[in-house]
Image (cartoon, rainbow, N blue to C red):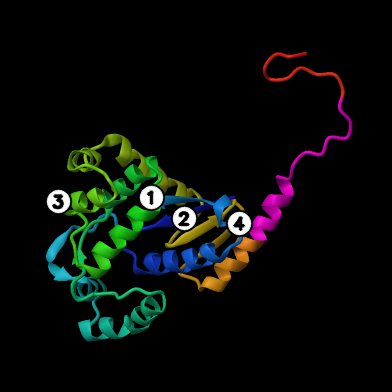
Amino acid sequence: MKVDIWSDTRCPFCFIGKRNFEKALQAFSQNDKVEVNWHSFQLDPNMKTDLTKNHYEYLSEVKGIPMSQIMQMHENLIQSGKNAGIGFNFDEVKVSNSFKSQMLVQLAKEKGKATEMEELLFEAYFKLGKDIDDVEVLSEIGEKLGFSKEEIQHAVQSPELAKLVKNDIFAADSLGIKGVPFFVFNEKYAISGAQPTHLFSEVLEKSWTEFSASNSDIKIIQEGDSCDVEGNC
């Protein structure tokens, strides 16, 4: 069974959604039969990296709202993070464009390590206040998953990986996805946003029931003369 997830590495609800989904997946009895595919998305592709501003200051400037109001608006988000085991550190979050980090996710997908890469990027950005647009920072993160510094430096300059990021973004647009996180189960059921764990559990069960029914073993009614794959007739 397949679950496709569109996510931006600088989206706090994507971090919460990831944790809530993973709790549901861990408790799911058929979790070893679930293939999770991460897809790139950018909430603000034209945003310029600016290390002189933190998360609150940037949003205050962009939205034209006093910073005190922005901080107040984040109270529920911070609590939701705590409920998911995440300690958001918005005072230290750097204003960083996420495109290069998305290229790292694409690189990790090739080695089956996209989930781990997503987690490390979220932690670096939201908890450690790292600039995820900086190649040195991305190299440190990549090295934790066994990638060399040279591999990371090549990855963030790779036209092929850049194209994969853009393809994911185009696919999201084609599906009408306007916000993330966005979860698609077996190309049939979708969950938008950082929903609670129990909802992910319900959709996993429903999707699995339908998936297993449509992919059950073929029952042979009667066997006759035939040739096998080794040419024996």
Range of magenta residues: 206-223
Is residue 215 rendered magenta in the image? yes
Q: Do tag 4 and tag 3 residues touch (Cβ < 8 Å)?
A: no
Question: Above or below — where is 201 with respect to 140?
Answer: below
Could you give the CA–CA distance between mark 4 and mark 3, rounded to whole angstroms? 39 Å
* Nearest-to-viewer mark from 1 and 2: 1
Residue 141 drawn at (x, y percent): 23, 53
Quadrant location of the C terminus? top right
Question: Above or below — where is 120 with respect to 221?
Answer: below
Which image quarter: residue 14? bottom left
* Nearest-to-viewer mark from 4 and 3: 4
Q: Do tag 4 and tag 1 residues touch (Cβ < 8 Å)?
A: no
Q: Earlier in the sequence, mark 4 or mark 1?
A: 4
Q: Earlier in the sequence, mark 4 or mark 3?
A: 4
Q: What residue does disc 3 label?
A: 136
Which residue does the image show at 19% across and 52% down from the upper left? 140
The kind of residue on which mark 4 rests is: Gln
The kind of residue on which mark 3 rests is: Glu
Which image quarter: residue 146? top left
Identify the element where label 3 is drawn. Answer: helix
The kind of residue on which mark 1 rests is: Ala
- Regarding residue 203, the answer to whether it shows in the image is yes
Residue 220 is labelled as none
Answer left or right for 159 relative to 231.
left
Answer left or right for 175 relative to 202.
left
Near-viewer residue (82 or 28): 28
